[in-house]
Image (tube, rainbow, N blue to C red):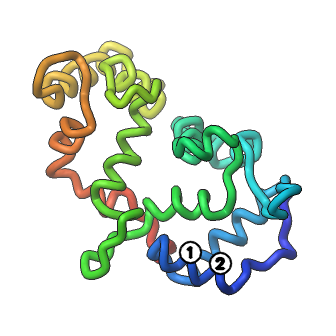
Amino acid sequence: MGQTTSRIPEHELEQLSIESGLSRSGILTLYNRFMSLATHRDKTTNEYFLVKADFESIQELKQNPLGDRIIDAFFADAEVLERKKVYFKDFVKVLSHFRPINKNKPHPWNSREAKLRFAFTMYDLNKSGTITKDEFQDILEMMIGKNVPIEQVKSIADRTMREADKDYDGFITFQEFCHAMDKTDIEQKMSFRFLT
């Protein structure tokens, strides 16, 4: 499928380790996965990159009910969205959200707020900066819809909106989302142990 013979330059490895907070071995693991998927090379920079179709061909994402939302997360950055290409640095930046938080070494790509913002974008389907009841219900249906009656899904969405929408305007803002997630251990729920 992708490339496997290329190596990441030492200076890039070091820079990404500093920027992402990931270990060199974690970055190399991600690099090997990226290169196994990469089928395109930029003619100007000579860098490999991924497009949406590359992500859509990943079997695990095809089977995941939130696969499309996960793919969209790689294209959430305005610059990435505009160029429609995910370079290795972009790939690392998105996946660094899933690194366990080191409270002794805070990192901007992997803070509690960064994890919450990432989670928020998964629910904000129309990228409006707010979550509507319909968006929340759509995500619930993707995750549990086939296992739970639609009326129960609607009830969960209604209750969540009542609890999270503090100003009762019909939208959950990022601040309201953060408040609703106060007691959630987002640091643990959004962590992969191999990304250290």
Neighbour class for label 2 at 10 Å: few (<14), some, many (≥20)? few
Vertical order, 15 against 76 (above or below): below
Q: Is mark 1 on a helix, strand or loop?
A: helix
Specify the quadrant that holds the N terminus.
bottom right
Q: Along the line of sight, which residue is nearer the eye, 161 or 94?
A: 94
Q: How many labels does the image show?
A: 2
Height in image: 60 above or below 35?
above
Q: In which image quadrant can residue 113 be found?
A: bottom left
- Furthest residue to the top? 151
- Image position of 54 with respect to 18: above or below: above
**Residue 7 sits above or below residue 138 on the image:** below
Real-space Cα separation, disc 2 to disc 1, in angstroms: 6 Å
Q: Please name the residue shown 45% across and 29% down the image.
A: 127
Q: Which residue is drawn at 79% across and 63% down?
A: 47
Q: What element carries label 2?
A: helix
Circle on res. 12: 2
Q: Where is residue 8 in the image (x, y as percent from the top left)?
A: 73, 78
Furthest residue toward front: 44
Label 1 environment density (alpha carbons within 10 Å; few <14, some 14–19, many ≥20): some
Residue 16's disc is 1
Disc 2 residue type (three-letter)? Glu
| Residue type at the position of mark 1 | Leu
Please state if 179 lies on the left or on the right of 41 as rendered: left
Q: Can residue 190 be seen in this view?
A: yes
Verify CB contact (< 8 Å) between mark 2 and mark 1: yes
Q: Residue 139's x, y, as percent?
A: 42, 29
| Image x and y of residue 87, in percent | 69, 57
